[in-house]
Amino acid sequence: MLNKIAVDTHTHTVLSGHAWSTLTENANAAASLGMHGICLTEHGPRIPGGAVDYAPAAQMMLPTLISGVTIFRGVEANIVDFAGNIDIEMRFINRTEFALASIHDIVLKPGTPEENTAALVGVLSHPYIDMVGHIDDAKTPNLYEEVILAAKDLGKLIEINNNSLLVRRGSEPNIRQIARLCKKHQARVCVSSDAHFWTMIGNVSPSLMLIDDIGFPDELVVNRSADSFHAYLAERADRLRRTGSIRKKR
Ligand SMILES: [Zn+2]
Ligand SMILES: [Zn+2]
């Protein structure tokens, strides 16, 4: 059984408007757990008080390492319609190293399961979106198997969001079902904290116990080790090169 993650792929700072720690506090927390890195995934601008749209590009100013922890530049984009469009323009999101997209009911009033599914499947086709976030949310019912198969086909990832167990009522059975389907289809996941305070960084034991409960294979957890996460990033770079989406060097 996995008892920790090496890279926390979903974390917020005060820049997200409703989180309470700084990047340095988050990095120090990760360092104290011996973690390799954290992805800085602030909310997109459509969340009230969220980071400005150009924040993913502004992250270029940050050091790569803080307290020995690698800071991966990212974003948690908001899905804004049922076609799966997001609130970050290509010229900003193309600076990210790891990006996820989620439905937040404060931005997109959830639709039918079919509409929510179309939004999640649609966003997975965005060249820079790596993962769909907290699809377990009972407020945004969707057809898990369709979303999982789309992610697998595109070489992308499903999130197992530990924060859902804490704040998204009714998520636990959904996460269990999502993990079972990922296991059945050999679809890859990241287990992440969705930390809004530094004590939450890397703190995903409840999720790891839950997926262990259903015999989830370790090798499907992309952020289990620094090597497996970097292997995914290399795959991402290849994919972007193949599709011609990679940002031209100036
Ligand atoms: Zn979210
Ligand atoms: Zn989040």
Image: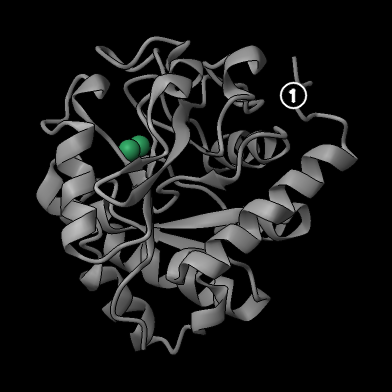
- Within 8 Å of ligand 2, the CB of disc 1? no
Q: Residue 11 placed where, x, y %?
A: 30, 42
Q: In terms of image quadrants, where is residue 241?
A: top right
Point out the image quarter for the N terminus: bottom left
Picture coordinates of residue 185 (x, y %)? 67, 74
| Image coordinates for residue 218, horizontal then vertical, percent | 49, 82
Residue 43 visible in the displayed image:
yes
Image quadrant in which you'd find residue 118: top right
| Neighbours of disc 1 within 10 Å: few (<14), some (14-19), many (20+) | few
Q: Which residue does the numbered mark 1 point to in the structure image?
A: 247
Residue under the point 37% across and 53% down = 37
Q: Quadrant of ligand 1?
A: top left
Q: Residue 9: percent from the left, percent from the top? A: 41, 50
The residue lying toward the viewer, choosing from 66 and 47, is 66
Q: Classify 172 as above or below 217.
A: above
**Residue 108 appears anywhere in the view:** no
Q: In which quarter of the view is residue 250 placed?
A: top right
Q: What colouring method underlies this structural image?
A: one colour
Total labels: the figure holds 1
Q: Nearer the viewer, residue 130 or 121?
A: 130
Q: Looking at the picture, does residue 115 appear above or below residue 26?
A: above
Secondary structure type for disc 1: loop
> Which amino acid type corresponds to the residue marked 1 in the rendered image?
Arg
Towards the viewer: 183 or 97:
97
Q: Is residue 2 above or below residue 199?
A: below
Residue plotted at (73% across, 45% down): 237
Residue at image point 77% right, 57% down: 153
Report the side of 158 relative to 239 (left or right).
left
